[in-house]
Each structure stands twice: as structure tokens, then as C-alpha cells.
Image (tube, rainbow, N blue to C red):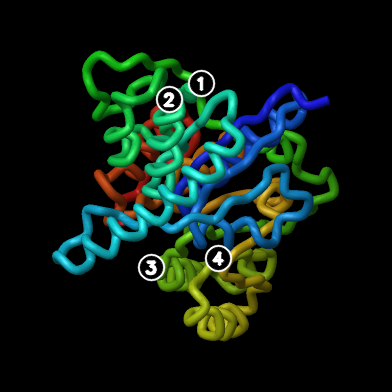
Amino acid sequence: MSAGIIYLAAGGTGGHIFPALAVAEAMNAKGYQTCLFTDKRGAALLADIEKLPVRLHVISAASPFQSGVFHRIMALTKLGMGALFCLWHIGLRPPMVMIGFGGYPSFAPLLVARLFGVPVMVHEQNAYLGRANHALAARARLIALSWPQTKNLPDGVATHITGMPVRTAFFAKRRPSCAGDELVLSVLGGSQGAIILGTLVPDALEMIDPPLRDNIKIYQQARPEQIDNLKARYRALGITASIKPFFTNMPDLLAKSDLVISRSGASSIAELAATGRASLMLPLPSAMDDHQKANALQMEQAGGGYCLDE
């Protein structure tokens, strides 16, 4: 018998989606049913995951802070369509609680939940409170924080440091004892990819003496338009490489990595910490409110890696 139902809402990037997935996994283990509201981008990230621990609701959403009157009108229209969808589903079966994980797809579900008197809380993954969570903070009973020194918190809101939710698979994976002399390097650009890593990393490896390159194996996340060029470059360097737009087996990948070069989105940081992997973090300069640099500096101060400006 189910202990009740919990609704989750998250934006369409990995930093929002995967913490929500981790919470769904934990709640299911305690007997709760879970439903996740997200947009098409979020649904695409979950498409290849086997045994998804949550029922998925895909809603219309967009940022209302876009430039230009037309784009803002379109964004508000999408948010309105998402709100109508949520009115139907939440009104039909109100949950015990609604938990938001940031991103504009969380707007409508949380606001509609409040209309029905459902308790609302938000979780902030980054070391800087994002715009969506900041706008929803006054309507939430609690803001759960990943970092003790989170910035941009409104005055008078209740907070609790929970840390960053991470799926159990990341804690279970450990480096095989038969790893040998092979050096495994994973280059990860976050769920949105990182074009610059497709240039920096092969350029750096080209400077290594050829005999040393023979023992290097690379797993690199890259934009689709970069893949052929990267494969050719690593082939010319004599380096074994697996290049993909996205790796769905991230727990296994991090478990066999000796070094990770990565962006510093919230999920990436938490997964590195859970697996205990050495990391070089390159914050995305265009990240909203420079939250990736705030994440990387917190990780560096804790001794979990090095923050390098792009």
C-alpha cells in the first residue's frame, strides 16, 4: 500500500532533473508514489534511463526573462499552458507535498499547488539561489540548500542544509582493482555540452610525450557537430577515445575514471563528490548569476578539486 503521493517539479537541465530523480528514488524506497513535472528537455535527459523511478508529466514552459516583447509573450503563453495542465492533474489528485528543484518548468506546478493548499518547498542545487527559486521562495515553507554559504537568499525565509541529492548508484560504484596502468580521463561538459573542451583537451594531450599517451583512454562528452573531428584528432594522437553527446551510464563512467575534467553544474559537482574522483572544474562563464563558479569554488575549498577559469 502506498504511503502517499509526492509531486516534484524541475527544469530541463541535468542540474535540476537528476536531484529530483534522486529524491524520487529515495521516496519510492519509503513507499511513496512520485510524479515529476518537467519540460521536453528534461524528458529527453531521462529517455534512456531504465526503470525510471518516477511518473513523468511533460509541460510547456519558458523563461519569462527573455529579451524582446514577442519572446516574452510566447514564454508567458507557454507558462499559462503549463499552468492549465497542472490545474487538471493537481486538482484531480493533490499530493502530500510539492517539491521544486528550480528552472522555469517548476513555476506553474508550484504556484498551482499553492492554490490547492498543498505544502510547497524548493531545493536549491547551486551555491547561488537561482531566479526561479528566488521568485518562489516567499511561497515556500522551506528552502533546502546544498551549500552552507548559499548566496542571494531573500530575508525571512526558512532554510535547511540538506546537501545535494545524488542517486544511490554513484555511492555504490568503486574503481575496479584490476585497473592496471591505464589512465582513464573523462571529459564532461554537462547536459548542455561544452564546445571549448573539444579544443582544449586534445590540444593539451598533444603536448604529452607519445609513449605516455599510449596508456590514456578518454571518455568525452561533446556536441554532435564536434564528434567526428574529435575522433580524428585522438586517432592521430594514438589515444583510445569514446566520444558521445551524452553518457547515460554516468555512475559506471565516474567509477572507472582517474581524472575528470568537467563543468561545475550542481549535479556534476555532487556526483564527483559522491564517487570521490579527482577533478578539474571549468565553470561555464555564461551560467546564470555565475552559479557554476560559486559551485566550483565551494568544491575547491573543500579539497575536492581545482577551479580553473575558462
Screen quadrant of the N terminus: top right
- Disc 2 and disc 1 in contact, CB within 8 angstroms: yes
Screen quadrant of the C terminus: bottom left
Residue 186 x/y as whole percent: 59, 57
Residue 235 x/y as whole percent: 62, 82
Q: Is residue 83 left or right of residue 92?
A: left
Q: Nearer the viewer, mark 2 or mark 3?
A: 2
Viewer-proximal residue among 205 and 10:
10
Q: Residues within 10 Å of mark 4 (few under 14, many from 20)?
A: many
Mark 4–mark 3 distance (CA, rounded to whole Å): 11 Å
Q: Residue tagged by mark 2?
A: 145
Q: Residue tagged by mark 3?
A: 196
Q: Earlier in the sequence, mark 4 or mark 3?
A: 3
Q: Residue tagged by mark 4?
A: 221
- Disc 4 and disc 1 in contact, CB within 8 angstroms: no
Q: Residue tagged by mark 1?
A: 162
Q: Earlier in the sequence, mark 2 or mark 3?
A: 2
Residue 13 x/y as whole percent: 47, 53
Q: Earlier in the sequence, mark 2 or mark 4?
A: 2
Question: Would you say residue 274 is visible in this rendering?
Answer: no
**Amino acid type of the residue tagged 4 in the rendering:** Gln
Q: Residues within 10 Å of mark 2 (few under 14, many from 20)?
A: many
**Amino acid type of the residue tagged 1 in the rendering:** Thr
Mark 2–mark 1 distance (CA, rounded to whole Å): 6 Å
**Amino acid type of the residue tagged 3 in the rendering:** Ile
User: Vertical placement of 2 versus 269: above or below?
Assistant: above
User: Vertical placement of 226 versus 59: above or below?
Assistant: below
